[in-house]
Image (cartoon, rainbow, N blue to C red):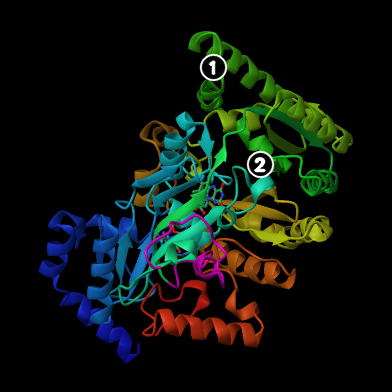
Amino acid sequence: MNSVYYTAAKAAKTMPLEALAAIIGVENVIEEGSDLSFYSTDVYRRADADAALVLRPGSVDELSQVIRLCTTQGIAVVPRGGGLSYTGGFLPVQAGTVIIDMQRLDRIVEVNATDMYVTVECGATWKSLYERLQPLGLRTPYFGPMSGFASTVGGALSQGSIFLGSTQYGTTAESVLSLTVVLADGTVVNTGSAAAQGGVGPFFRHYGPDLTGLFLHDAGALAFKARTTLRLLRAPAHSGFASFTFTSHADLLTAMSEISRRGLAAECYGADPYIWGMRLWDDDLMRDVKRLAGVVKAGRSLLSGLIAGARMAIKGRRALAGAQYAMNVAVDGNCAASVQTALAEIRQVARQGREIEPTVPRAVRGTPFLPPNDLLGPKGQRWAPSHGIVPHSRAVALADALVAFFAERAEMLRENGIEWGFVPFAISTNAILIEPMLYWPDAREAYHERMIAPGHLKRLPVLPPNPAAAEAMRLLRLDLTRFWMDQGCVHLQIGKTYRYLESRQPTFRALLEQIKAVVDPQGLINPGSLGLTVP
Ligand SMILES: Cc1cc2nc3c(=O)[nH]c(=O)nc-3n(C[C@H](O)[C@H](O)[C@H](O)COP(=O)(O)OP(=O)(O)OC[C@H]3O[C@@H](n4cnc5c(N)ncnc54)[C@H](O)[C@@H]3O)c2cc1C
């Protein structure tokens, strides 16, 4: 323990709670109880040291004031959005840390359909943004992760995120026009055109060096994102869907890469036999039907729609039974003909595969944001994904190497009951993400009980603590981070897990550390995130 550690811990105990309560209201200062451990737990694990305090500011000004008050006392402050990440991004690494929960900053400040942008506070969820824009016939290019029921816009901007719209429009960062960030000393900075004196509005990102980009994918290490402005699109008038199965991951990835290169799909993602088959032994058919209800609302009546939806789900599940590697595609277009043309070209590209009912991509689009019930596996196991991103030319080799990586550890996996499967995703025209999902038998945390919908949680077996499996998982995840680095992968969701800094060239690393020293001279914003030194 060094002296700064002691200073922080001591300062936290003497934190002027009255002054904080005067800024954000006493009800938004959490200083004891189970909430501290809840806020200090992510999907994968609980922090070694719980936060000393959780603060819940409700405006940009309140955020700025509480950050300034904490950092002038030498207290580390950590931004937390919906808490749905699994790479330790918001977990305190030293005693005396204050977590700042961003979820009260959830206003949609301006929808500008003339200049085609939306300004939103960063604690808003993707679901709330989607639901606000949908009736207006508008959408952001990237429009949310699968966790968007509860995960926030700020979390995705800080982690880097892909899913809805990402095969067409790339990561969250590529939709951003401007940010309002709060630095360690409480200074509020606007970026892009919004930085003009006199205020000309947040309509353009690249006016001079891209300071917006500096803060994106920063794992919350450089500043707090308070507000952002995202580009708007007219929501596509037509969508179409297709699903295929393949007999090898090479055929699957080859087809995905070609669809991505040709720019044919809004989303193109797959599943290996383990993950695809999981939908079968998870006998939650009603989940599919519920999702499909969203799709079929436009039908003659909800009831007939539900019946049609249920039939489709059953048919889809039958099609899955013999499936091996699966690929799901969603296509957007402004007219039915352009969607059909793209689908015809996709069928041509995927001719090695067998076409099946597109239940999954249709259902996902029907109701994109459901409670995060997949936080635990269908047998009640713990769940944590990992991933690597490569260019198309290396996707098949990466999958081959990944299969070999797990084959080498088969005995250890079997001994500890660890299971795995992977999902690939095509990002824009230029990259493939491969995400192994790891499941292991271990007790759930209070965090999971609070995040999963009660009806779903009730049906999951409760598993006892399994320290041996937990330790095996810790080592496996560590090995995986080296594997990804050796394979030359890049990552979203760097948090405090991937070997980001370690894998950077010395000149890049030095520059980044100098930037950190300018925006956060005492190193008090999210210490350890991105691998930046803990003071
Ligand atoms: C069931 C499930 C499905 C998922 N699906 C996807 C998916 O489809 N695509 C995908 O990319 N990811 C997915 N994820 C991972 C994760 O949910 C997303 O990356 C999501 O964007 C995290 O957002 P959050 O608000 O929960 O962030 P948090 O977990 O709260 O925080 C993540 C990081 O961002 C920082 N941060 C949060 N808010 C701010 C802010 N305002 N300013 C500065 N830093 C901040 C935190 O310090 C932390 O480092 C999924 C996770 C789950 C559990």
Quadrant in which residue 308 is drawn: top right
Residue 246 seen in render: yes
Q: SS class of the residue under badge 2?
A: helix
- What percent of the width, then of the height, locates residue 263? 76, 44
* Residue at horizontal 51 percent and vertical 44 percent from the top: 116
Q: Is residue 416 left or right of residue 277?
A: left
The residue closer to the viewer here, 506 or 438, is 506
Magenta-colored stretch includes residue 207: yes
- Residue 275: give its label: 2
Residue 90 vertical placement versus 71 (above, below): above
Quadrant in which residue 101 is drawn: bottom left
Say which quadrant the C terminus sits in: bottom left
* Residue at horizontal 51 percent and vertical 9 percent from the top: 301
- Residue 364: give its label: none
Residue 467 seen in render: no
- Magenta segment: 197-222
Say which quadrant the N terminus sits in: bottom left
What residue is pinned by disc 1?
Answer: 298
- What percent of the width, then of the height, locates residue 161? 56, 54
The residue closer to the viewer here, 240 or 187, is 187
Q: Is residue 119 left or right of residue 166?
A: left
Residue 321 vertical placement versus 18 (above, below): above
Residue type at mark 2 is Ile
**Cα separation between marks 2 and 1:** 30 Å
The residue closer to the viewer here, 449 or 243, is 243
Residue type at mark 1 is Ala
